[in-house]
């Protein structure tokens, strides 16, 4: 079972890595540009368009795909961790 979850986790990780990383970094950059008034030469409007997927005309389902990808990675990751596995009783 763990082997199949590793396979799915690896595939999901590869697929979801770029959109999640782009969402995280553009969100951080938007906050830095707005709150700290640092001029990076990029407008916050452009950063938000990238952040929400609007620049690729995906704003309707980009957040949903990001969320589903994260949930899938979380489920496969937790299942592989053995956190909720059966307890093995050891004899004296």
Image (cartoon, helix red, strand yellow):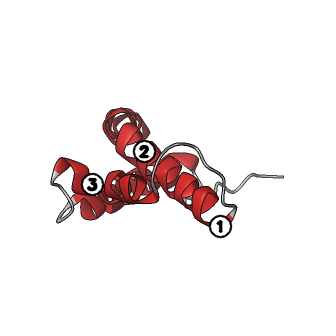
- Asked if labels 1 and 3 touch by Cβ distance under 8 angstroms, the answer is no
Say which label, 2 or 1, has the lower sequence index: 2
Q: Look at the picture and state if 81 lies above or below 71.
A: above
Q: Residue at x 64, y 54 (%)?
A: 88
Give the x, y percent position of residue 10: 39, 33
Residue at (36%, 32%) from the top-left corner? 14
Query: Crowdedness of circle 1 by 10 Å Cα count: few (<14), some, many (20+)?
Result: few
Is the Cβ of the residue at disc 2 closer than 8 Å to that at disc 3? no
* Disc number lying in front (3 or 1): 1
Marks 3 and 1, the one that precedes in the sequence:
1
In terms of secondary structure, where does tag 2 sit? Answer: helix
Residue 65's place in the image compared with 12, above or below, is below
Left or right of residue 64: residue 73: right
Q: Quadrant of residue 68?
A: bottom left
**On the picture, is 85 further left or further right than 52?**
right
Residue drawn at x 57%, y 51% as measured from the top left: 82
Measured Cα–Cα span from mark 2 to mark 1: 20 Å
Write down the residue under mark 2.
22
The alpha-carbon separation of the residues under discs 2 and 3 comes to 10 Å
Q: Which residue is mark 3?
A: 53
Q: Choose top left, top right, bottom left or bottom right for residue 89.
A: bottom right
Q: Which residue is mark 1?
A: 35
Residue found at x 31% / y 37% = 15
Mark 2 and mark 1 residues within 8 Å of each other at the beta carbon: no
């Amino acid at each position: 079972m763990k082997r199949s979850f590793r396979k799915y986790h690896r595939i999901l990780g590869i697929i979801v890595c770029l959109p999640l990383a782009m969402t995280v970094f553009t969100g951080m950059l938007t906050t830095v540009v707005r709150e700290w008034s640092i001029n990076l030469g990029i407008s916050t409007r452009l950063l938000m368009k990238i952040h929400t997927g609007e620049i690729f005309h995906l704003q309707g389902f980009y957040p949903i795909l990001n969320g589903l990808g994260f949930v899938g990675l979380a489920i496969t990751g937790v299942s592989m961790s053995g956190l909720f596995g059966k307890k093995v009783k050891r004899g004296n």
